[in-house]
Amino acid sequence: MCNLRGRPAPRRIDIESFYHCNPEDYIGYFADESGYDSLIQEDCDIYVGGVKMIAFRKSLFPKLKEGAAGDPETWNYLRWAARFCPTDQRGLAAGRVLTQDVDSRLTCGQENFFRKTRMGKVMTLEEALEMVRSSPDYSLVPMRVSAVKEKYPEINEKQAPLEKELFKRSISNERRAEIKEQRGVILRSWFEPWLINVWAKAEDKVACATETEKELVTAQFRANKVFSNILGSFDRAPRLPYGRLAATAAKKYEEFVSHKDIYQTACSALKETLNTPDNPRWDKLYEKFSKVKDLNYNLFGTCFTTVTLNWNFRTAYHLDGNNCEGGIAVLTAMTKGEYEGHYLVFPEIRCAFDLRDGDFLAGDNQSMIHGNTAMIKKTPDAERVSLVFYSRERMTRLDDLECENCRKDFLAYATVHHTEHCKSRKSNWGGVWVNMWKSQEWMDYKKKNGMERCTNTNHWGREI
């Protein structure tokens, strides 16, 4: 637990108001020294307009404050969890300039065409071509490459030699990037002929664009890949309408539980630093998340539900989007080797923080733009795992984990026993159908398995 008594009073910085930062000039771009005037390396409170916005304390987490050398077991677990699987789901926080998987992506102009045509805002070939050609940069939206190659055999034939070369281990990184650029040009070459010969001649241009987008473009955005993962649990989603432990928690559950003192330190330090009688932010969070139906959902009695772990991830300027209304994020870090930089910059208050082993920072990261400067390695083994604690609103709407597992099992059961609900007859149907949670099939399944206490709520957690 956290004990701040006996420490000297923190430095206080008063700022009259936030500096204006146009999000379009910041989001997705990387921080550097131009984003701050003050580098904070000691206990400090930041006030804006008389309201405490950020609390920063040095060496507050006992397990983390000595770094990898001080607690190798904790370091190994957090590093493993952060590196468990690289992700391309961090959006513009991974950088506006896309450098990975460029061959599979639409251009920004092509993405804009589909988006605006769906709304009926582009109806002539001249408008479409101007839009497409004016934005040649890569977008976050990838094509269904296999579908493109199947529909256009000539494209598959042209790119096949490049694809074959990509599998050679001997090619340089420069040549690999060049091949991907060339392959991408070929894979996107279907678009303008389709635009001219099919879409421009279609009577219903909205329907034509919608059908082609559904066939050849994925609905899942893809950013640059980074090492970023989570501890804790996931709430429900349309395709996976059940709560579940994150893989990093489930695969090494005992180690996940054994580090609950870290989670509880983050919670108690937040209470001691940012909770005030006139602004009881911690009280509101704790009141809400103390009522979840499973201790796995609130990290064993804290006001947080989730920890994001980042390994050597230099985030571009961004705003956090998954925290609940009124939520406050807590950050800390654990390191190995020696490095400079990797400061956490808040340009709207012109401050940067040197967040090191076991340091504590609390603030509203969903309303304040923030990002990291570059890490400058001083030793080859320099590494950094950062931890970001926050609270996901919909965790409060889940049943306990046993009931959520029952929902998961029901989906698998439905794919075998209730295939009449799969209209498309796809072989990879996941068992989800409209209004399934008020269906007789679900009622019977619950009864058969002695789980009648499980609710009939949808993926939003609402009774239907």
Image (spheres, grey):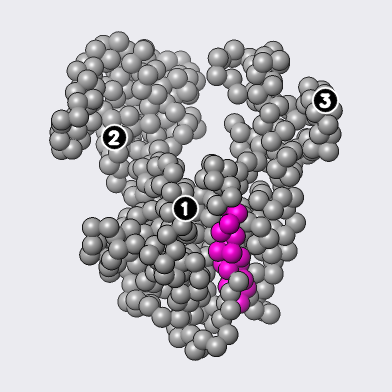
Q: What residue type is labelled 3?
A: Lys
**SS label for mark 3:** helix
Of the residues under marks 1 and 2, which one precedes in the sequence? 1
Residue 421's spot in the image, x, y percent? 69, 17
**Residue beneath disc 1:** 77
Say which quadrant the N terminus sits in: bottom right
Task: Decide: is 246 above or below 19.
Answer: above
Q: How far apart are marks 3 and 2 (CA)?
A: 50 Å
Mark 1 or 2: in front is 1
**Residue beneath disc 3:** 448
- In the rendered structure, does residue 193 fall within the stretch colored magenta? no
Query: Which of 245 and 114 lies nearest the eye of the viewer?
Result: 245
Mark 3 or 2: in front is 3
Image point (54%, 78%), residue name: 52
Image quadrant where residue 344 sits: bottom left
Q: How far apart are marks 1 and 3 (CA)?
A: 39 Å
Query: Which of 61 and 428 lies nearest the eye of the viewer?
Result: 61
Residue 231's spot in the image, x, y percent? 54, 50
**Residue beneath disc 2:** 102
Image point (75%, 30%), residue name: 437
> What's the magenta region?
256-272
Q: What residue type is labelled 2?
A: Val
Say which quadrant the C terminus sits in: top right
Image quadrant where residue 300 sits: bottom right
Of the residues under marks 3 and 2, which one precedes in the sequence? 2
Q: What residue type is labelled 1?
A: Tyr
